[in-house]
Image (tube, grey):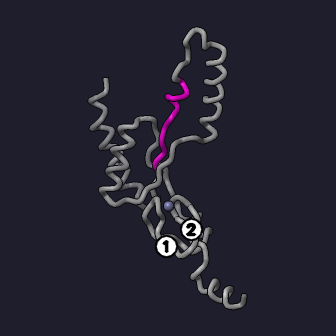
Amino acid sequence: MQSFSQISSIGILSDMFCPLCKSEYRDGVTICNDCHIPLVMTSEQAQKSSVRTLWEGTDEKLFNQLTAALDDAGVPFTSELRAGPDQMIPLLLAFVLRLIFWRFGLFKGYAEKQKGWRVRVLSSDYSRTEEMVTGLRHAIEPELD
Ligand SMILES: [Zn+2]
C-alpha cells in the first residue's frame, strides 16, 4: 500500500488531462487520442488552458475541409457535433410542430437542419487558424447558388 502511494506521488500512475478537449486519461497515456497533443498533469492546468471556438456551423463540406486543413497544418483541434442547450429548444419545438402538422407534411427535416459542428482550437492557435476559415469560406461561397 505504501509503495503504491509512493509510485503515485511521483506521477507514474497519476491521471493526466488534455488541455484542449479536457479529457482525462490514465495508465501512462501522455498524448490525447483525439487532439494528438501532450497531456498535462492536473485538471487545473487543463482547465486554465484557454480554448476558443474557431468555427461553428451546419456546412458539412466546410467542416470537412476545415478539419482536413487543420490536420495538414498540424494544428491540434477538437470537434464535436453541436448538441448544446441552445439546440434543445429548437429540437423540442420541431418535434412538437411535427406532431401538430405532420398531416400537412410541414416542418419535415427541420431537426436535421439544426445538425451542426463546433471546431475548437487552443487560443494560442486561434489567430493563424482564423485565416484558414476565412480562406475556406471564400473558396466555397462562389459555388453556392
Ligand atoms: Zn484532447
Q: Secondary structure at mark 2?
A: strand
Please indicate whether residue 145 sits to the left or right of residue 60 in the image: left
Taking depth in this image into account, of 133 and 62 the one nearest to the observer is: 62
Q: Is residue 53 above or below residue 8?
A: above
Q: Residue at x 47, y 54 (%)?
A: 78
Disc ID at residue 56:
none
- Residue labelled 2 has its Cβ within 8 Å of some atom of ligand 1: no
Quadrant the C terminus occupies: top left
* Residue type, mark 2 in image: Tyr
* Mark 2 nearby-residue class (10 Å; few <14, some 14–19, many ≥20): some
> What's drawn in magenta, residue-wise?
110-119
Instruction: From the top left corner, tell me how far across and down residue 15 is, in percent.
Output: 60, 73
Residue 14, percent from left and from top: 61, 77
Q: Is 112 in the magenta? A: yes
According to the picture, the residue beneath numbered tag 1 turns out to be 30
Identify which residue is drawn at 49% across, 37% down: 116
Residue located 62% across and 69% down the image = 44
Please identify the residue farthest to the top as the structure is shown.
104
Q: Earlier in the sequence, mark 2 or mark 1?
A: 2
Q: CA distance from mark 2 to mark 1?
A: 8 Å
Q: Are marks 2 and 1 in contact (CB under 8 Å)?
A: yes
SS at circle 1: loop
On the rendered structure, is 129 left or right of 117? left
Q: What residue sits 46% from the left and 48% below the top?
A: 119
Residue corresponding to mark 2: 25
Left or right: 38 with respect to 141? Answer: right
